[in-house]
Each structure stands twice: as structure tokens, then as C-alpha cells.
Image (spheres, grey):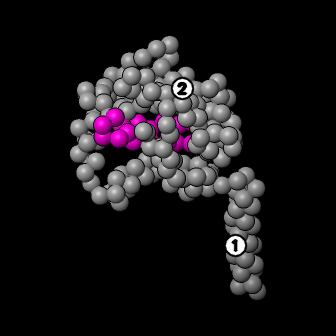
Amino acid sequence: MPRFYVLSGPTVGRTFELADGGVIGRGDDCDAVLPEASVSRRHARLAREGERWVLADLESQNGIRVDGRRVSRCELADGDQLVLGKVTLRIRLAPDEAPEAPRPRSGDRKPAGDDAVTIGIDPSSARAKHGASREARRADLLVGMQDEPGGFLRGDLAQRPLPLRLFLYLLALAIAVGVFIGAFELTQFLRR
């Protein structure tokens, strides 16, 4: 059964397992709830097709993105990273569910259907990491959180609600204006 790790959004750090037919979405009736406005109420469904796991978009507004490209469905492999709305997820399959054959690298991807994309990593590296300690595996999974450029203003602050972001921006502006006025008054005082 695939395990999903939330790498961004309001529930960053959360993990959940999803069975065949499980639904991911914002709605309370979903098997895995992601409380993010960019995630539809019923966003995607997980299905087992033979030996493979497939995540299918349920006609959501923001869709599923793989490498910045929107897809209607994608075949999952151990270590895959995809985006639902603005929430980034990393998938881990149980060792017996991980594909045995080497998977294509990102430049060699081929569509599996209409606009489906097969995504994956080298399974030998995934199996080598499987024996690592739980803390090492968790640290490896959370590395994806550091991948977005932009620092504090685009990473951590972007995940906060709009009123809080506006308040913090206005507070920073007020501090900057206060420093400027203080410096101006100090120069006026010293000229006297």
C-alpha cells in the first residue's frame, strides 16, 4: 500500500497510506484530507492496475502536476514526487510493491496513455535506502522541502494565510519606515 509524505502546504510533515480506490482531496469525505484551498474537494483517486499503482485526476481544478506538466493520470514508483494543487507529495511503496525493472530517468519519460506520464527513480537506490534507519529515511524524504528557491518569503511565508502575510509585510514596512525616520531625526539633532 503506497505511503504519501506531504512536503509542502499546511499539513507539511504529515504521512498517510492510501488503499486501492482511495481518494485524496480537501473534502471531509476523502480518505486522505489535504486542507489546502488549491486542492479540490475530491482531487485524485489511487488505483491498482496489475502490479502498478496509478493516481488519476478526478477532473480537479488545479490537477496533478509532474515536472511542471499537468497530467490526468500517472503511474507511481517508489520515490516519486508530484504536486496536487499547491501541495507537494512524495510516494513510498512497500518493498514488495516497488517495480523490479529499472525505471526511466526524467529525460527519458514516455507517456503511458493519453497524457499520462510515468515517473520514477532508480529502484536500486530506493532499495538501498530502505534498510536505513527511520530517521535517515524521513530526512531523505523531507529534503524535497528545501528544493524551492526563494528562501523565507517564498517558502515558509507562502504557506501562511493571506491576512498573516499581509500583516507581516506591513510590519516589515513599518519597521523600515521607523528606522528611516529615526535616522533622519538623528541627523537633524546632530546638525543643531
As helix, strand or loop, the secondary structure at mark 1 comes to: helix
Measured from the top left, where is residue 187 in percent x and y?
A: 71, 79
Horizontally, is 102 left or right of 33 in the view? left
Q: Which residue is mark 1?
A: 179
Residue 81 in the magenta stretch? The answer is yes
Horizontally, is 107 left or right of 4 in the view? left
Measured from the top left, where is residue 114 in percent x and y?
A: 50, 13
Residue that appears at 43% across and 39% down: 2
Q: Determine crowd level at label 2: few under 14, some 14-19, many 20+ residues with C-alpha closer than 10 A.
A: many
- Which badge, 2 or 1, is on the more N-terminal residue? 2
Give the total number of marks visible in the rendering. 2
Residue that appears at 50% across and 47% down: 16
Q: 132 above or below 187?
A: above
Foreground pick, 7 / 42:
42
Which numbered disc covers residue 156? none
Indicate the quadrant where residue 174 lies: bottom right
Residue 185 in the magenta stretch? The answer is no
Q: Determine crowd level at label 1: few under 14, some 14-19, many 20+ residues with C-alpha closer than 10 A.
A: few
Provide the residue span drawn in magenta.
78-97
Quadrant of the rendering where the C terminus is positioned: bottom right
Distance from label 2 to label 1 (Cα)?
53 Å
Foreground pick, 96 / 38:
96
Residue that appears at 64% across and 24% down: 59
- Say what amino acid the circle numbered 2 marks: Ala
Q: Which residue is mark 2?
A: 56
Q: Is residue 155 visible?
A: no
Quadrant of the rendering where the N terminus is positioned: top left
Measured from the top left, where is residue 12 in percent x and y?
A: 54, 53
